[in-house]
Amino acid sequence: MTPRAILPGGIALLALGALGAALGGVAFASSWLAAALIWGSLPLGALAMLMTQGLTGGRWGEQSRPLWLALAATLPLFAAAMLPLLFGLHTLFSWTLPAQELPEVVRNKLAYLNRPFFVARSLGYFAIWLGLAWALGVWRRRTAPVQAPGLILWLLALTFFAFDWFMSLEPEFYSDIYGLMLGTGMVAAAIACALLLGAQHMDPGARRDMANLWLAILLGWAFTAFSQYIVIWSANLPEEIGWYIHRSRGAWRPISVISFALFFLLPFLVLLSSAAKGRADWLMFAAASCLAGHVLQICWLILPAFGGWSALQVWLVPALVLVVGAIYAAGYNAGQRINRGAEDG
């Protein structure tokens, strides 16, 4: 995506963020954060798949590479969506309160959780991801051999990004495996998006290879999510168990079940069939289910940190998800045109 192509989408995202800053309120800021992370997960996952494809090659990689390039080209939109939130940290994060008002376990983290360091880290994450995208040829024809170290750098940046923008919403909570769980979930959602958009244009062998890779990533996500649950529950620490309690009250309990069924269980059952792995219609059905579950899962991870649903969020969250999604769709189409132009050139 060229600067000219990114400009309208970036301006729209920044304008929406400015509107949220003008309106103020936790409801808007938390809803905006959830919508930004729902769609921003896709270019991040695509970036990892682009590096994996560069390392492994294969027919699946040849046929899927244009999809990863187009998805990764929306990464600047993710940066634009997150930028306004840096000016409203006090609305989202309780650790911005005066130290004397914070629990001791949070005060012990303030050397890490403070505004200047938080902003610097966030800018650093996006500098790393945008730099990797540039090196991998997302906006140009040439590529650099950064796949192996790039994957390590991608995961490290994503892990600390997860600590900052997800986990520190409830700063008493801590999990070592949180970043890996989030990373596998993002990659699984990106593969689902690529299959939904491009499965019908792949040959059966490439679809089958993509499906097998997707199944492995989904199983990795399930393993890390279950491991986190078991370790935290068996440790019986109030600060950590509270994170799950917040997500099992009211509407969040059925949402957690539905998101698990859509994101993992239904695609898993489809992918157990070797015949379904080679059929575009079955893969697209499983991919649509996974993406719907991804939306619910990100909401489940983010919004319970701010209490129950407000009347405003009942319509605001779906509206923001749709609006931000439309801007990302325009960015994806622009990325496809740029890729075709580079191939023709």
Image (spheres, rainbow, N blue to C red):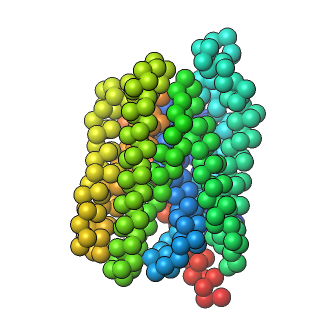
Q: Nearer the viewer, residue 9 or 163?
A: 163
Point out the residue furthest to the bottom here.
Answer: 344
Q: Is residue 247 above or below residue 6?
A: above
Q: Which image quadrant for residue 153?
A: bottom right
Spot occupied by residue 42 in the image (x, y as percentages of width and height): 50, 57
Residue 170 appears in the rendering: no
Q: How many marks?
A: 0
Q: Is residue 215 left or right of residue 344?
A: left
Residue drawn 65% across the image and 88% down it: 345
Residue 48 appears in the rendering: yes
Q: Is residue 64 left or right of residue 91?
A: left
Q: Is residue 252 above or below residue 264?
A: above
Q: Which image quadrant for residue 225?
A: top left
Point out the residue furthest to the top here.
Answer: 100
Spot occupied by residue 215 in the image (x, y as percentages of width and height): 36, 60
Residue drawn 75% across the image and 41% down it: 120
Q: Which image quadrant for residue 94?
A: top right
Residue drawn 72% across the image and 48% down it: 124
Spot occupied by residue 224 in the image (x, y as percentages of width and height): 43, 44
Q: Nearer the viewer, residue 251 or 278?
A: 278
Q: Nearer the viewer, residue 321 or 249?
A: 249
Spot occupied by residue 1 in the image (x, y as percentages of width and height): 63, 69
Residue drawn 34% across the image and 28% down it: 248
Q: Is residue 134 left or right of residue 257?
A: right
